[in-house]
Image (tube, helix red, strand yellow):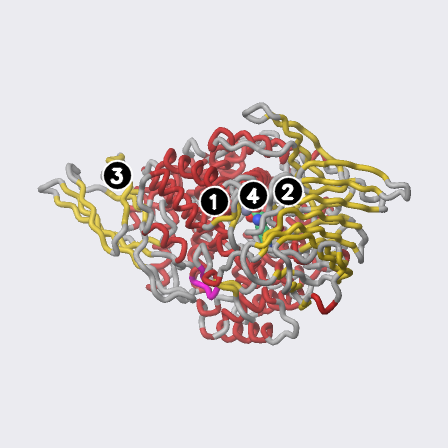
Amino acid sequence: RQPKRLADYQPPCFTIRTIDLTFELAATATRVTSILRFKRNMPGNMVLDGQQLILESITLNGETLTAGQYELTADSLTLSNAPDEGELEIVTLINPAQNTALEGLYLADGVYCTQCEAEGFRRITYYPDRPDVLAIFSTTIITDNHALPFLLSNGNKISEQTLSDGRRVVRWEDPFPKPAYLFALVAGDFDCLSDNFVTASGRSVLLECYVQKGDLPRTEFAMASLKRAMRWDETRFGLEYDLDRYMVVAVDFFNMGAMENKGLNVFNSKFVLADAQSATDLDYFNIESIIGHEYFHNWTGNRVTCRDWFQLSLKEGLTVFRDQEFSADMGSPTLNRIDAVKVMRTAQFAEDASPMAHPIRPEQVIEMNNFYTVTVYDKGAEVIRMLQTILGKAGFSAGLKLYLQRHDGQAVTCDDFVQAMQDASGIDLTQFRRWYNQSGTPELTVKQQYDAANQQLTLDISQFTPASAEQAEKLPLLIPVRIELLYQDGTPARAELLLLSEQQQQFKFDQIPQQPLVVWLEDFSAPVKLHTSYQTTDLLMIASSASNGLARWDAMQQYWSLLIAEAIKQQQTPVLSAELIAVFRGWLLQPLADLALTAELLTLPDFDTLAGQYHEIPVAALLQCLTLLQQQIAKSLQADFAACYQQITRESYQYSEQAVAKRALKRRCLGYLALTTEGENWVAQHYQQADNMTDRLAALQSAQAAALPSAAQLLEQFAQQYHANVQVMDKYSNLVAVTLSDDVFSKMQQVTERSWFSWKNPNRIRALYSAFSQRNPQQFHRADGKGYQLLADVVSKLDPVNPQLAARLLTPLLSWRRYDKARQQQLIAMLSALLAQPGLSDDVFEKVSKSLP
Ligand code: B3K
Ligand code: ZN
């Protein structure tokens, strides 16, 4: 199977001016009539993409073509003698009911729904399915099915009528030219929450949120989030919404979080519906952030889109950065930053070290859906953040403004984006562009020297990016390194932004009256790994004194990594120092003003973060150190955790920054208290007193993490209480999947036998198996390979049903090189068996074949 390459990009031979679509909806045979007005752009054939379509007829300028006049393959329709301009009418039949891949038009749970990004439109009709073909779309939806009162598509609703035969017809027109990946159609029965938003320039926009019948009360937070996002984009970047109507539809069958189709966002219901009884603080946070993300795409993605899919980070990295800034403004900047850094250190660094390593602008792709990755999204956002750091906030905003003005209505490249940033700021970004084509995690080694006689501080920084799976050679990058200097007593001396451009570089500072402690890479100013010569005492000092909250948290993360690494090296068990106990006690008895940060300071790094530091991951030793340390902390500070827990008053549920922070700190204390001899009581009491899902779940999680004997019974009680709410049952699946004992396998099996479980619904499957592979390292990485085998079996079973989902679940199995010989052999055998599976999808093939030696 041949990959597509960025280097082979060719502009399209034909552009499409307008596309007029008519859908005659029927479960197993929907007829799609597409009328295209085309115009030649370059010499060459007219090649239209198409997959799993039955071609009924094709007419060129009014004349029906016969079989010899076009060429049909499994994924294309080619006209070799197309005129330079004309009209093509193509009629195809598709089968939405049978579409379990959830790409193109599918029927699930009684709702017709589309997902076209990246290359799903070709499963609806023959079309140049590439983002650089922008056309004006109009859509007519026809149905005789009265169970589908709402017939939705992009843009403005132009007409709605009932024909004499009883069929209903609705017509939509979208005035903005768009690529096919932004097309959407939804037909179903919903409840609709309507609202109104008046833009900065005074235009009134109708807002509609369509949800499953009965879910209206759980829709208000999403609607309020949408209005906040719309206002925020106006104030922060001067960007207004451009249509008269903005629709959000929540569906339960969806491969990812949400989709930014023009004027008609489709959302995974998980990221729309919320109330205190069924959603957690994290759910609320995610809803606001994803509602924001899809809305922000209207400018960064829709008005200005990607020339080709290799440029995906152009819209995704930028839009993630925008949603992160929005969330930071709506809540705690520190907590938001901590979350982003965690994603980088757990998932993204791991991807860089895996066979799937790629730059934020990949160079070759077999299946595009495999490249919606933490690298393209989250590292992409870090790259944008570095631009803002280098240009300053005002310079960055000016660059974004120029980019959107210059390229409105176009499909462009990451280079175009950087060029606009450079032109608006006058800062040369030539070297910076390397971030777009170089993969791997850069590593910085830092040293400091203090000359007391001359009061001079010298800092030496060197950079090195290890070779990654697909790219051996690496060049020095332009890396913004923020630092803060602290005096020995912890008072701040000064803050600086260093721009590292050489492989090795020296920075000197005068008039430094005493030897300072350097806080390196403050605010995670670049997505790199850091090698320092910190002692544990330095790190505790930074954790207690740095001005930046992220830097304080980061110092604690480094503290634990250092302690654990030393213990593993010496083959000893790690021991808590009196100093650490004192620092923790201080935070517990007198928490910082930021309670959520306090909770994070009291949290050990997770297995994946620690694993990122090792070439060969010492699985058993890491897990053992983590368990021991947590137990020791709980034991040594039991009374302090209890005091802190009790000091935080319980209030009726509210989603606000302060209330969330209080619950987070209480939950952190509970996590440790659950490990003490009084654990059962603490957990039972927390569970019983809970008036909301966040607290209830916290009790269950603590019970599971501490492997309390009562956990199973509590979980059953929970399942019985909420069995009617499938979203809450996904949380139940999460909890079952993190069972520490060997029972986890039979318990997960039982979940799949519950009436609400479905092998066709991605949410159900992820709730069980992604939770298992990502949050239960004890069982997933078992020495006997049973954990890996479970995931491999699920991937194999799902590949024919939903390849995109199968390929995503597969990821943790790819990095076999990071484990000991025995695990390597197990994983290689499982991957080889997968590769031999007949009819394997491109999605799974690409990943497995890259991984195997
Ligand atoms: N653009 C979509 C993701 C599409 C994924 C296709 N496999 C959602 C988003 O990033 O906003
Ligand atoms: Zn996006």
Extent of the magenta region: 353-358
Q: Looking at numbered disc 1 in the image, what kind of residue is underneath it?
A: Leu
Which residue is the site of mark 2? 265
User: Disc 1 marks which residue?
Assistant: 318
Disc 1 Cβ-to-ligand 2 distance below 8 Å? no
Q: Residue at x 74, y 68 (%)?
A: 67
Q: Which residue is mark 3?
A: 486
In the shown orientation, is residue 596 left or right of residue 530? right
In the image, which disc is placed on residue 302? 4
Per the image, label 2 sits on a secondary structure element best described as strand
Residue contact at pointers 2 and 1, CB within 8 angstroms: no
* Callout in the foreground (3, 1): 1
- Decide which of tag 1 and tag 4 comes sooner along the chain: 4
Q: Position of residue 485 (x, y in %)?
A: 25, 40
Principal secondary structure, stretch drawn in magenta = loop
Q: Upstream in the sequence, badge 3 or badge 1?
A: 1
Q: Is 577 positioned to the left or the right of 145 in the image?
A: left
